Image (spheres, grey):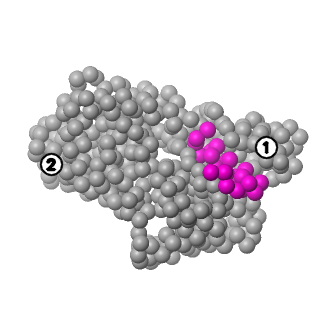
Amino acid sequence: MPEMRANEELEGRSGVAAGGAHGGGGAARTIRVLYALGPGDVVEFYRDLSAGRAPGFQMSMAFSQQFFDWADGAAWDEGGNDEAGRGGVQIVVHGISSHPRADRLQAGSHCVENRPRRQFGNGRGWRFYLGQFCYGLRVVGWALKDRADVVIADSGTTEWIVLGLLRPFGIKVIAVLHNTLWPMGHRPRRGLAGLLRGMDGFFFRYIAGATVGVSPECVRQVKEIAGTPKGSVLECRAQFRTGFLERVAQVADGGRSPFQVLFLGRFEAIKGVWLMLDLARQLEAEHAGGFRWRMVGSGSEFEAVQTSVMRAGLERVVSVERSLPNEEAALETMGWAHAMIVPTMPDFCEGLAMTAAECVLAGRPVVVSSVVPAWEVLGGAALKAEAASVVSFADAFKRLAFEPGCYEACRRATEAVQGQFYDRSRGLGNVLGGAVVRVVDGRGRSD
C-alpha cells in the first residue's frame, strides 16, 4: 500500500528484497493472501495513513504495516530466487481484523476490513471456544471466496485445527504466534485445554506450511507438541522506530532515591496489576518512602485499582494513570522510571511482552514474571521473578534499588540487546514475507 505508508522508514529489508514496483516487466503472477489479524482497528489505522495523518500513538511499528510494506516491495522469480524485479510476482493482501466496528477500506490492490466476531453469551468457558471455532469457519469461507493462495492467521483468531479445513483446497496456511500456546512453564496435560493443545500438535505437524513466533518460547512450544513440524518454524522480533526511545533521559548517577518503578500495559488481573499493588504495599511497609510506583494503561480493572489504591492509603506512593496519549507523555513517563515491571500471572500466554522491550530500549532494567518470554532475549537487562510471587518480585526490586552494582550491570546490559529490535531483517514483515515465498514455491522447511 504505497499510499498508506507512514513516514517511518522500513530500512534493511532482506529475505525477499524490496525494490519499488513488482518487477520491471509487468506482473506475470498474482499471489493472493488473506491475513486474519487480531482485534485492532486496522481500517482506522490505514485510513489515517492514507490521509497523511499519524495513527494513534504507539511506540512499536505495527505488525500489519510491516507486512503490507513487504508486500508492496516484494517480487521474486518463479525459480525461487528472492530478488526484486526478477519475475513480476505481485502480492495482493486482504487483511481482516475482528475489531467490533465493521468497516472496510480499499487502497490499490490491497484491502483491509474490520469484521467483528460473534460472542456467544458471556464469551467464557465453552462459549469462548464456540466463538473461536465459528470465527475460524468464517476465515475459511473468506479464503475460499477470495481464492486465496495463502492464509496467514494471528494467534487468537481461532483454534488452529479449524484452519486444517483449507488443506483439501490447496490453500497454504501460515501461523503467526504473538502469544505462546500455553503459559511458559505451565503446559496443560488434561481436560479441554490439553485436548486442544494435542490438536494444535496435529495442525503444526501436518497442516501449517510455516510458523512465525515472536520469541524462542513460541518456537520451542510448536516443536514440542508437533515433534517434527511440517513447515519452517521461524522467529521474529518486534520492531521500533529508530531515534524515539533513545530520546528518553538518562538515569542520573546516584539519583535513585526513592526508586521509581513503572508499569505500562493493560489493567487486567492476568497482567498482574493486583500483584503490583501487593508489592507496593509490602515494600512501603518494609522501606517507607523507598519506592514510588506508576501504573499507566487501560483495561477492565482500571477503576478498581484506583479505588484500591485510595482505600489502602497508597496515593502518596502509587499513581494510577490513563494510557500514554502521545510521544511527549511517553518520553516523560519512561524518563521518570528507574526500572519497569512486567508482572504477568501464570495463567496468561505471554508471547514476548513488548513493554519489556520498550524498557531496555529506554536504557532501563526490567523485572519480569517467569512466564514472560522476554527475559530470555533481554539477557542481563532483565531480572526474572517467580510468577505470582510478591516475595520474589520484592527481592528483585530490593536488589536493583539497594545494590548499586546490580543496577548498573543491568543498565549496561540494555545496550547489548537493543539491536535486535531495530534489525528490520528480523521484523515480522521480512520474516513472514520469506515464509510466504517458501510456502508458495513449495520449498518447505529451512530450519
Q: Which mark is residue 282?
A: 2
In the image shown, does 399 or 96 lie closer to the viewer? 399
If the image is split into quadrants, where does the N terminus sit?
top right
Looking at the rendered structure, the secondary structure element under dot 1 is loop
**Residue 224 image offset from top left, x and y in percent:** 50, 62
Residue at x 24%, y 36% (from the top left corner): 400
Identify the main secondary structure in magenta: helix
Looking at the rendered structure, the secondary structure element under dot 2 is helix
Q: How many marks?
A: 2
Gap in angstroms between the C-alphas marked 1 and 2: 60 Å
Q: Amino acid at mark 1?
A: Asn
Residue at x 25%, y 29% (from the top left corner): 405
Drawn side of residue 321 relative to residue 377, left or right = left
Drawn side of residue 242 relative to residue 334, left or right = right
Evaluate whether residue 46 shows in this view: no
Residue projecting furthest to the front:
227
**Residue 184 image offset from top left, x and y in percent:** 40, 57
Name the N-terminal-most of marks 1 and 2.
1
Crowding at dot 2, Cα within 10 Å, few <14 / some 14-19 / many 20+, comes out as: some
In the image shown, does 7 or 152 lie closer to the viewer? 152
> Does the stretch in magenta take in 11?
no
Asked if the residues shown at circle 1 and circle 2 are in contact, with their CB atoms under 8 angstroms apart, the answer is: no
Task: Give the magenta-colored segment's residue range.
Answer: 425-447
> Does the stretch in magenta take in 435?
yes
Q: Which mark is residue 81?
A: 1
Residue at x 34%, y 60% (from the top left corner): 346
Residue 157, image quadrant: bottom right
Q: Which mark is residue 224?
A: none
